[in-house]
Amino acid sequence: MPDAITKSVIREIEPLWLDEPVGPAARRVIEADLPALPVVDGDGRFKGIFGEREFMNALFPGYVGELSSARMVSRDIDAAIERRESCREEPVSKHMTTDDVVAEDDYSDTRIAETFIHHRVLVVPIATKGKVHAVVTRNDFFKVLAEKLGEGPEDVGQ
């Protein structure tokens, strides 16, 4: 059956909105038990992705991502959070990843694999007629691929 991998791991979701504040958006990502959620405009059309990495980029000063080591930066995480506490009210649109990674319903497993390989995303949004309604996580996709290769959890110890 073509596209059996993606169809077996697709998850229906409620996407984030462009103007949704970072704080509530982070809470929704956690509640969805996903590493990220797609961000959509008022018409439900894909605009970006906001999740774990984007949240950390919002919370920590921009230079942290440029450092090869953060040893000289204060270890006090509470102080860092206090300095950037205002990010809680910033819109996710300010921090989201904007790579065009949405797949329409005519996707193939190879298209999904190519997206994970070439983009630094943890979810690929799935859309019907341009409106995002589901995601495939890189972790779920990986697990099914490994199982198909005979290296899944049930194969451990054989």
Image (tube, helix red, strand yellow):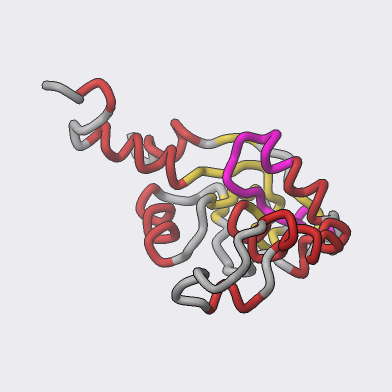
Residue 148 relative to residue 31: left or right: left
* Image label count: 0
The part of the image, by quadrant, that contains residue 130 is bottom right
Q: Residue at coordinates 35% horizontally, 36% vertically from top-left?
A: 143
Q: Residue 7 location, x and y as percent? A: 46, 35
Q: Residue at coordinates 19% horizontally, 24% vertically from top-left?
A: 155
Q: Residue at coordinates 73% horizontally, 54% vertically from top-left?
A: 78
Q: Is residue 91 above or below residue 139?
A: below
The part of the image, by quadrant, that contains residue 29 is top right
Residue 36 relative to residue 114: left or right: right
Residue 113 relative to residue 37: left or right: left
Q: Residue 135 location, x and y as percent? A: 58, 44
Q: Is residue 32 magenta?
A: yes
Q: Quadrant of the N terminus?
A: top left
Q: Residue 138 location, x and y as percent? A: 45, 47
Q: Is residue 35 magenta?
A: yes
Q: Quadrant of the C terminus?
A: top left
Q: Residue at coordinates 66% horizontally, 58% vertically from top-left?
A: 76
Q: Which residues are magenta?
A: 28-44
Q: Residue 79 location, x and y as percent? A: 74, 60
Residue 36 relative to residue 79: left or right: left
Q: Nearer the viewer, residue 22 or 127?
A: 22
Q: Is residue 9 above or below residue 137?
A: above
Q: Nearer the viewer, residue 126 or 82?
A: 82
Q: In the image as oriented, which residue stretches furthest toward the left? A: 158
Q: Is residue 64 above or below residue 20?
A: below
